Amino acid sequence: MAARCHTFAGHERFAIFVVMTQYIADEAHFKEVIERVTKVRKSLWIGTADIKDLYVEDRPFLGILADLIRKGREVRLIHAKEPGPNFREDFDHYPVLFRGLERSLCPRVHFKIIIFDLQTAYIGSANLTGAGIGMKSTRTRNFEAGILTDEPELVDAAVNQFDSVWAGFKCKTCGRRQYCGDPILK
């Protein structure tokens, strides 16, 4: 628990609030992280090294992103490499993604960050794949770990790291620009 002091009409008042920091392991990624995606009210930022045709029950994850965009949510995606043919086929089923999904490619991205409404962040090891964060069998999925938190300092750090890549601040001094098929800054 933490306390913050607010001044209102010349009087100081303290507010008590609870900060959530939760350790997420293995299959809990699906329940605690992916299910939270459907509940965003303003924005969803996703950073991952690898992205594949992740399914949520019988539906492509891209369908959930398309729903968010249709509802006016901002959805940003940074990933390190072009996804495979199955992902691209699923992508083509959702025309709203062409217009509404803000997407950037950076071959140096290895972080796995999901930021919900700029208020809560997942920071961990799981890529946006079935074996990483999805619903693969407990016998075939990766062993993953991360934290889910609304602790302001951690969320701000995740937002700042994501945004510095998104805005291209790292591009000018990047030593791997020759591998960048679609530079953020030209």
Image (cartoon, grey):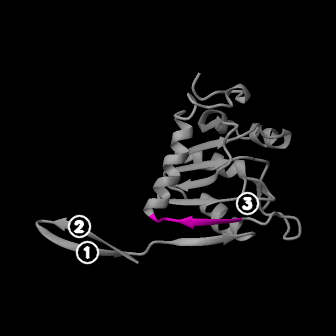
Residue 113 on the magenta span:
no
Range covered by the magenta-colored residues? 145-151
Rounded to the nearest whole Å, what is the CA distance between mark 2 and mark 3? 39 Å
Residue 100 seen:
yes
Whether 90 is drawn above or below 18: the answer is: above
- The image shows residue 19 at horizontal and vertical percentages of 45, 72
Q: Residues within 10 Å of mark 2 (few under 14, many from 20)?
A: few
- The image shows residue 74 at horizontal and vertical percentages of 53, 44
| Helix, strand or loop status at disc 3 | loop
- Image point 58% across, 43% down: which residue? 76
Rounded to the nearest whole Å, what is the CA distance between mark 1 and mark 2? 6 Å
Say which residue label 1 marks: 14
Q: What is the residue that sits farthest to the right in this orientation? A: 139
Q: What is the residue that sits farthest to the left in this orientation? A: 10
Residue 148 on the magenta span:
yes
Q: Is residue 30 left or right of residue 58?
A: left
Say which residue label 2 marks: 6
- The image shows residue 123 at horizontal and vertical percentages of 60, 59
Mark 1–mark 2 contact, CB under 8 Å?
yes
Q: What is the residue that sits farthest to the top in this orientation? A: 186
